[in-house]
Amino acid sequence: MNEKKGFSSKIGFIFAAASSAVGLGNLWRFPYLAAQYGGGIFLFVYIILALTFGFGLMITEIGIGRKTGKTCIGAFKSLDKRFGFLGILGTVIPFIITPYYCLIGGWVTKYTFTFLTKSVSSFSNDTFFTAYITKTWEPLLFLLIFLVCAAFVVMRGVEDGVEKASMILMPMLIILSVLIAAYTITRQGALGGVMYYLKPDFSKLTVKTVLAAMGQLFYSMSLAMGIMITYGSYMKKEDHLEQSVRQVEIFDTLIAFIAGLMIIPAVYVFSGGDSSAMGAGPGLMFITLPKVFNTLPLGRVFGFVFFVLVFFAALTSAISLLETLVSIIMEKFNTSRPKTTAIIALYTFLFAVPSSLGFGIWSNIQPLKMSILDFCDFASNSVLMPIMAMFTCILVGFVLKPQVIIDEVESAEGHEFKAKKLYSFIVRWLAPIGLFGILVTSVLAGFGLFTW
Ligand code: PHE
């Protein structure tokens, strides 16, 4: 195998895994879901699930990676031949996600530029975003800019590229997000919004809230797509797996929490708590937020800083996606890193084109009545990822037995797996059942839109 280098240090691993996890999921998806599903109650459910479900899945994947020392395809095959299909699934999923993830990264890049060059009042309206994504060429240009930045880092390799970039970008991200959150929660009237976000209202607890939180967790922690397996394979034996996973998990959840604090109180103040604004969904960041910045003093400056932050977070996640694809191809075909990166970048660009044009000149193509991008998102996040994670849990929980992962965690001297009982329960019961729930409900919802 050629030049498969690991991370230089434990902290390098934590930074790299955390910077894969922290991305659009935390800054864009989490706040709009939390706003939509009742604020405090969503946050509450999410945190409980992160500490159980998310923890169990992440330790499983990183454990598999470190134990086998292989990326997804090789890893599952070497554990159990019958589960080799998981390797293929884990390969297909990032191949689906990467193009459209980078496309959204391109939208963020566009907004970052727009805050820099235009007055906020000129684009803080309902039409700017839609008008932009329906264009033919401009979104592709910004996609290209975003993609070139990410590919540049991946080309330099794990230690020089991925790890260094994360070590610089992550601390910046924390500082910027704390600054912005401090700014928005000290605006007049923001307290009501802060309460909405922090205080759980148990009367709003529904099965849907739980499933939405579970799906989000999955996405946010980059689980079920081979990424954490790849990163686990780079992890050193002497690093403490359980502690590292806890740190990544806490970090990811903390950033999602702060993102909520940046956005929800601001939107709450701006809209007077109006439910249609709170339930804006995916448009919350691109449509509602600029309107909020437009009403705030120094809004343009803070808006710009905010989008720079989102840009970095999206970039580091895109890097981890590209890195996964590159390492799969390198392992399989023994090609050089620069050449493989170039090929993968070209692939990403070409396959992002349909998702982009799906909002414009190809909008008549509507698989399951969804736009092409939504369809890719649905196929990966709602169908393939739950299947992948569920079978991974079945493999580890019942075929290999949780002890295999527990032994991996405890393989270095003095490493005790503190939560091993909880872990066994999660991987055998809680996770597979929950995943089955997500799968069934999301497939039904997807096909519910489908009328012959
Ligand atoms: N976890 C990343 C986020 O929160 C998203 C991501 C999804 C990253 C899929 C890699 C793969 O944005």
Image (tube, rainbow, N blue to C red):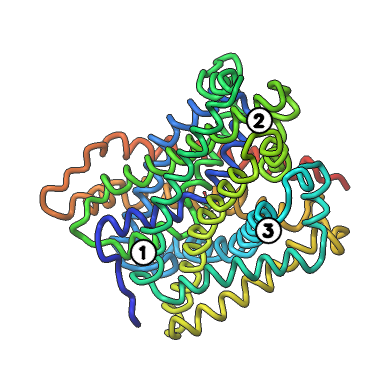
How dense is the environment of label 1, judged by Cα within 10 Å: few (below 14), some, or many (20 and up)? many
The answer to whether the beta carbon of the residue marked 1 is less than 8 Å from any atom of ligand 1 is no
Q: Residue at x 77, y 50 (%)?
A: 129
In the image, residue 256 lies at what x, y percent?
A: 49, 39
How dense is the environment of label 2, judged by Cα within 10 Å: few (below 14), some, or many (20 and up)? many
Please name whichever residue, 174 or 236, is drawn nearer the observer in this view of the structure.
Answer: 174
How dense is the environment of label 3, judged by Cα within 10 Å: few (below 14), some, or many (20 and up)? many
In the image, residue 419 lies at what x, y percent?
A: 26, 37
Above/below status of 277 relative to 89: above
- First in sequence, mark 3 or 1: give its number: 3
- Can residue 375 be seen here? no
**Residue found at the very far front of the displayed protein:** 297
Q: Nearer the viewer, mark 3 or mark 1?
A: 3
* Quarter of the view holding residue 210: top right
Please name whichever residue, 248 or 430, is drawn nearer the observer in this view of the structure.
Answer: 248
Q: What's under tag 2, amino acid-wise?
A: Val
- Can residue 408 be seen here? yes
Q: Residue at x 45, y 49 (%)?
A: 173
Between the C-alphas of marks 1 and 2, the distance is 35 Å
In the image, residue 84 lies at what x, y percent?
A: 45, 65
Residue under pointer 2? 267
Label 1 sits on a secondary structure element that is helix
Left or right relative to 439: residue 227? left
User: Which label is found at residue 110?
Assistant: 3
User: Which label is found at residue 190?
Assistant: none
In the image, residue 264 lies at what x, y percent?
A: 60, 30
Between the C-alphas of marks 3 and 1, the distance is 26 Å
* Quarter of the view holding residue 36: top right
